[in-house]
Amino acid sequence: MSNQLYIVSGPSGAGKSSLCAALLEACPNLHLSISCTTRNPRPGEKNGREYHFLDKETFEAQKNQGDFLESAFVHGNYYGTRQSDVEKVLASGLDVLLEIDWQGAAQVAEKIPSSKRIFILPPSIETLRARLTKRGQDDARIIENRVLAAQVEINHAHEAQHQIVNDDFERALTELKALVLC
């Protein structure tokens, strides 16, 4: 059996990063592919751990060379997954987890139809707004932009084979682990 590529998407504030972190702890055969981005690191983030932080020119050059399995412009910054990074992990015998937006998920699914797409949904837009506010990372304008973007992103949930509503973290994690088969 060949290794599996799992794609987890969902709007900012749905809890996909927390769910993916817990999933990775529970699944030793699963490896998170580190995406590239042109956004600035947040406090505590390290290059190569949360993201590969690239300047816009480097990102665009790599994109033009066809290095990315997927890429998208999200919240004012470029994001992308290097194809070579994914191929290297799959060749090592591990499954790969991509935590990416719906646009990138659609690109990967087109190129790798055997990938398994999972969309994480918030229980409501109000809950999403509260989670984004509680994070304390963004000002009110950015939060409202993320809420508006989330409403668009949620319209793409049906494109994934599986949807998980993150209204209870442990239940959502149990559902996610069942899909990943770890």
Image: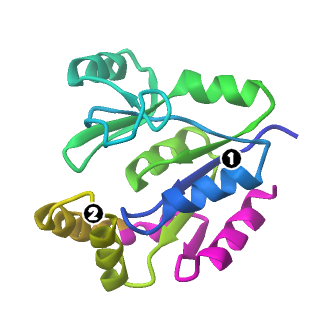
Element carrying mark 2? loop
State the residue in front, 132 or 74: 132
Percent coordinates x, y for residue 37 in the rendering: 34, 34
The span shown in magenta is 154-182
Residue 126 higher or lower than 175, as above or below: below
- Residue drawn at point x = 38 percent, y = 67 percent: 13
Percent coordinates x, y for residue 14 in the rendering: 43, 69
In this picture, residue 93 sits left or right of residue 163: right
- Residue drawn at point x = 58 percent, y = 62 percent: 19
| Image quadrant where residue 165 sits | bottom right
Percent coordinates x, y for residue 135 in the rendering: 33, 64
**Residue picked out by circle 1:** 114
Task: Using the image, tell me which numbered label, if any, was put on residue 80.
Answer: none
Q: Residue furthest left?
A: 141
Q: Quadrant of the N terminus?
A: top right
Mark 1 or 2, closer to the camera: 2
State the residue in front, 149 or 158: 149
Percent coordinates x, y for residue 132 in the rendering: 31, 68
Dot placed on the residue nearer the N-terminal end, 1 or 2? 1
**Residue picked out by circle 2:** 136
Residue 117 visible: no
- Residue drawn at point x = 43 percent, y = 34 percent: 51
Q: Amino acid at mark 1?
A: Ser
Distance Cα–Cα, label 1 vs label 2: 38 Å
Residue 156 higher or lower than 66, as above or below: below
Q: Amino acid at mark 2?
A: Gly
Answer whether residue 156 is magenta in the image: yes
- Residue drawn at point x = 22 percent, y = 18 percent: 57
